[in-house]
Image: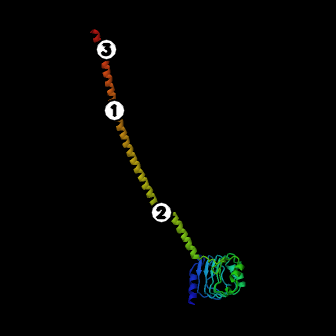
Amino acid sequence: MEMKKRITLELRNRAPEKVTELVLDNCRSSNGEIEGLNESFKELEFLSMANVELTSLARLPTLSKLRKLELSDNIISGGLEVLAEKCPNLTYLNLSGNKIKDLSTVEALQNLKNLKSLDLFNCEITNLEDYRESVFELLHQITYLDGFDQEDNEAPDSEEEEDEGDEDDDEDEDEAGPPGEYEEDDDEDDGGSDLGEGEEEEEEEVGLSYLMKEEIQDEEDDDDYVEERGDEEEAEGVQGEKRKRDPEDEGEEEDD
């Protein structure tokens, strides 16, 4: 009784039109319904009512956006056809631990066209021969029955899918690389450019020294040229003097 009052109070104190997930496990239903749960929860996508002593779904409110419905450990034995009318977009339905005994009861789920996962674990129907094959043949739209597909591959857990999504984001960030790495690369590039500038300066210095040496060599060559030129002029002067002297010598001989 206290649990029922607490759940009802919580429902009344929340804005139903803003609720997307609602867990009412272990609360007690009255005449097939939980007080406070109504069609005002129009944005509800996930509803869990495990172990609330539900015997029927006839008074379940219309929840057109509901995608996941947990009804495990209740006393439901039939009347599943109302789900297609009140929750047409269901993709996951858990009816484990209920009083479902035969395939005709499950056949009513054929109109849930978006249903991908159905759980009937701990229901009497699971004791039927070729139970899994029969259900998969009856409900072509489902991919997973009791947590496994037709090839016994386990259904991914919703939390694991979220974790995988986070890991992918981390991998993308790793591939992009933290900002520090780029800064280090820039520093290395700067270091390389500094080194290159240093080498250029050395090349410039060597070039200047080389030019200075060339200028010194040119000056020495000019000096040598001047000296050679002077020697040539001296030699020409001597030859000129000899030429002058030779006629004089000839004149003196004639006088003699």
Tally of numbered tags = 3
Q: Residue at x 47, y 60 (%)?
A: 182
What whole-number distance in Å separates the C-alpha atoms at marks 1 and 2?
67 Å
Q: Residues within 10 Å of mark 1 (few under 14, many from 20)?
A: few
Question: What mark, if any, has residue 224 been given in the picture?
Answer: 1
> Which image quadrant for residue 101?
bottom right
What whole-number distance in Å separates the C-alpha atoms at marks 3 and 2?
101 Å
Q: Amino acid under label 2?
A: Pro
Position of residue 27 measured from the top left corner of the image (x, y, whole percent): 59, 87
The image quadrant where one finds the N terminus is: bottom right
Position of residue 155 measured from the top left corner of the image (x, y, whole percent): 62, 77
Position of residue 156 measured from the top left corner of the image (x, y, whole percent): 60, 76
Q: Between tags 3 and 2, which lies in front? A: 3
Q: Nearer the viewer, residue 111 or 215?
A: 215
Q: For the residue labelled by badge 3, is the local secondary structure a helix, a strand or a loop?
A: helix
Q: Nearer the viewer, residue 180 or 21?
A: 180
Badge 3 or badge 2: first in the primary sequence: 2
Q: Residue at x 43, y 53 (%)?
A: 193
Q: Between tags 1 and 2, which lies in front? A: 1
Q: For the residue labelled by badge 1, is the local secondary structure a helix, a strand or a loop?
A: helix
Q: Amino acid under label 3?
A: Pro
What whole-number distance in Å separates the C-alpha atoms at marks 3 and 1?
35 Å
Residue behind mark 3: 247
